[in-house]
């Protein structure tokens, strides 16, 4: 079988893909916001889904051509593909910044050339589910910063929203065109052992990673062009044009030819490469806070020819630093007076101020109810089960089995403050217990779930194919209409034995191929 041949590439491959079906070592895992899966403390955990081979070791139908293509290559040729991709990334300058790294802050983004394949029918369901979810999140934001009907109807506890550090009172009453609070969303998905995708978390503040999706595709079209044409892989190159169209659709009324700019915190931000990339691809200005000024409740960019009006600001700065008049007064990154400009309706910020409440981990637990409330529909994509420790009975249950759960602060992002029960020391668990007991409403718990694996180039010489955990971040745009980028950012744990997919901790990415049919 193909699984057997794939496994026989090398002794290392045989160790990883042992048995007649290319079986994988048991690595039961839970992905958290930092990109770190964890082992389940279980006597007999389920095997993670192998996205390229089924349980009998046969290539999945959508992956058959890719498997045949890879099997036809000599091991050295596989390694050359990886090396060629790395050289191209070096020439293209595809990097990310790592905070606090003494060896240097800027790194080349790691890339694996074995593509992840998603069939047309699977993607059709995902696309519908993603649009459904972002529409509901957007309706939720428009509601809570407007009439607050969902709170009046007690679908979500009022104190949960008003007490969240991500709820921005300054955003109440600000209504962007089309009520579009979420223009760009990055929704993190994990694939369970049964093959079904689940929502892990929502990213609707300043989601990043789409530039790597586009650059990954550039690489793959150069190293596997024939295979991509044969499989009819759906294009992703149109994303910058779609993003620009979505942003222009948000322009205040009366702006027939709106001016768009990208607001960046500057070159030390971890996603600065993406800010530069997207501004160049859209053909718009990249600005920092010091380049902008608010005059007469209008937003302007400073130029050598004087002030130029800005209609839509694609901001990549968090709320806290966006406007020192309203939020942090010590911020040097934002634009004084910007909130007043937005309230006057003379400019639009994407994403809108206050969208972070939709990222709150406790609010996440209510998203299935949001979909039902606003859309009258059942959720198409399920969420990872989430426990609110603000409930005394739930808190007691979790604390009694703390080593079995992943504990997350409700208002944090990026994996900060996360405690992974199965990997935590007794001291860490005890410290976590004390923090939860002091402020239970500030935490949620999630059970350990599976994270699928995908064959990935490994080994010192890059000639071994071994299973590595992956997740997926698709991107959804919401202007006058929804637009979904086919595929998204597949992150992969590249290091042997590692369960970390985060790029700053040894993770990388794959190109995600969505097939037309």
Image: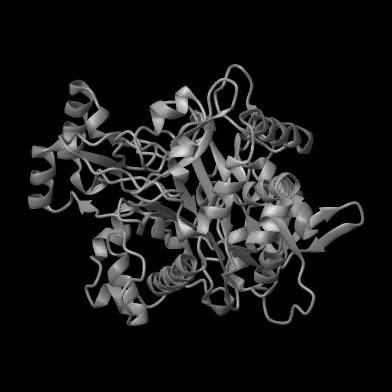
Q: Is residue 12 above or below residue 433?
A: above
- With 516 as the anchor, is 159 left or right in this view? left
- Seen from the viewer's position, the closer of residues 432 and 60 is 60
Q: Quadrant of residue 71?
A: top right
- Residue located at (70% from left, 71% from top): 245
- Residue located at (78% from left, 58% from top): 284
Residue 345 in view (yes/no): yes
**Image quarter in which the N terminus is found:** top left
Residue 324 in view (yes/no): no
- Seen from the viewer's position, the closer of residues 162 and 298 is 162
- Residue located at (83% from left, 59% from top): 307
Q: Quadrant of residue 140?
A: bottom left
**Image quarter in which the C terminus is found:** bottom right
* Tally of marks: 0
Q: Residue 297: horizontal and vertical position, in percent?
A: 67, 67
Residue at the limit of the structure toward the front, as seen here: 1
Residue at the limit of the structure toward the top, as seen here: 102
- With 38 as the anchor, is 344 left or right in this view? right
- Residue located at (70% from left, 48% from top): 224
Q: What's the colour scheme?
A: one colour
- With 127 as the anchor, is 286 left or right in this view? right
Q: Residue 348: horizontal and vertical position, in percent?
A: 63, 67
Q: Residue 106: horizontal and vertical position, in percent?
A: 65, 28
Q: Residue 390: horizontal and vertical position, in percent?
A: 17, 51
Q: Is residue 442 above or below residue 294?
A: above
- Seen from the viewer's position, the closer of residues 411 and 92 is 92
């Amino acid at each position: 079988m193909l699984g057997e041949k794939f496994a026989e590439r090398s002794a290392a491959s045989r160790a990883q893909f042992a048995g007649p079906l290319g079986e994988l070592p048991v690595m039961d895992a839970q992905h958290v916001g930092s990109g770190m899966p964890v082992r389940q403390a279980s006597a007999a955990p389920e095997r993670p889904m192998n996205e390229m081979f089924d349980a009998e070791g046969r290539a999945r139908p959508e992956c058959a051509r890719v498997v045949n293509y890879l099997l036809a290559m000599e091991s050295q040729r596989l390694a050359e593909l990886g090396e060629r991709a790395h050289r191209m990334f070096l020439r293209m300058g595809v990097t990310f910044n790592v905070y606090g790294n003494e060896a240097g802050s800027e790194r080349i983004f790691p890339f694996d050339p074995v593509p992840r394949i998603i069939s047309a029918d699977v993607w059709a369901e995902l696309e519908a589910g993603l649009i459904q979810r972002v529409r509901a999140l957007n309706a939720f934001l428009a509601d809570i910063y407007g009439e607050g009907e969902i709170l009046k109807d007690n679908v979500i506890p009022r104190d949960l929203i008003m007490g969240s550090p991500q709820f921005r009172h300054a955003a109440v009453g600000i209504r962007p065109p089309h009520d579009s609070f979420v223009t760009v969303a990055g929704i993190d998905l994990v694939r369970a052992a049964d093959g079904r995708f689940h929502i892990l978390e929502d990213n609707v503040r300043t989601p990043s990673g789409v530039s790597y999706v586009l650059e990954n595709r550039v690489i793959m079209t150069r190293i596997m062009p024939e295979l991509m044409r044969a499989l009819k892989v759906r294009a992703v190159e149109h994303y910058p044009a779609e993003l620009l169209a979505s942003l222009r659709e948000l322009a205040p009324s009366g702006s027939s030819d709106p001016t768009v700019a990208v607001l960046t915190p500057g070159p030390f931000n971890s996603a600065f490469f993406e800010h530069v990339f997207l501004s160049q691809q859209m053909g718009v200005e990249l600005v920092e806070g010091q380049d902008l000024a608010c005059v007469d409740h209008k937003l302007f960019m400073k130029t050598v020819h004087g002030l130029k009006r800005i209609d839509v600001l694609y901001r990549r700065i968090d709320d806290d630093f966006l406007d020192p008049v309203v939020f942090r007064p010590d911020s040097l990154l934002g634009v004084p007076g910007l909130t007043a400009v937005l309230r006057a309706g003379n400019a639009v910020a994407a994403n809108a101020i206050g969208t972070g409440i939709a990222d709150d981990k406790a609010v996440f637990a209510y998203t299935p109810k949001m979909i039902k409330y606003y859309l009258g529909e059942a959720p198409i994509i399920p969420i990872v089960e989430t426990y609110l420790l603000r409930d005394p009975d739930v808190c007691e249950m979790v604390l009694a089995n703390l080593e079995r759960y992943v504990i997350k602060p409700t208002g944090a992002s990026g994996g900060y403050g996360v405690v992974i029960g199965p990997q935590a020391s007794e001291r860490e668990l005890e410290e976590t217990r004390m923090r939860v007991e002091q402020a239970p409403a500030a935490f949620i718990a999630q059970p350990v779930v599976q994270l699928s694996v995908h064959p990935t180039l490994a080994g010192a010489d890059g000639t071994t194919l071994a299973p590595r955990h992956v997740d997926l971040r698709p991107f959804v745009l919401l202007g006058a209409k929804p637009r979904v980028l086919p595929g998204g950012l597949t992150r992969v744990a590249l290091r042997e034995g590692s369960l970390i997919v985060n790029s700053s901790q040894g993770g990388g990415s794959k190109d995600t191929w969505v097939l037309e049919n």
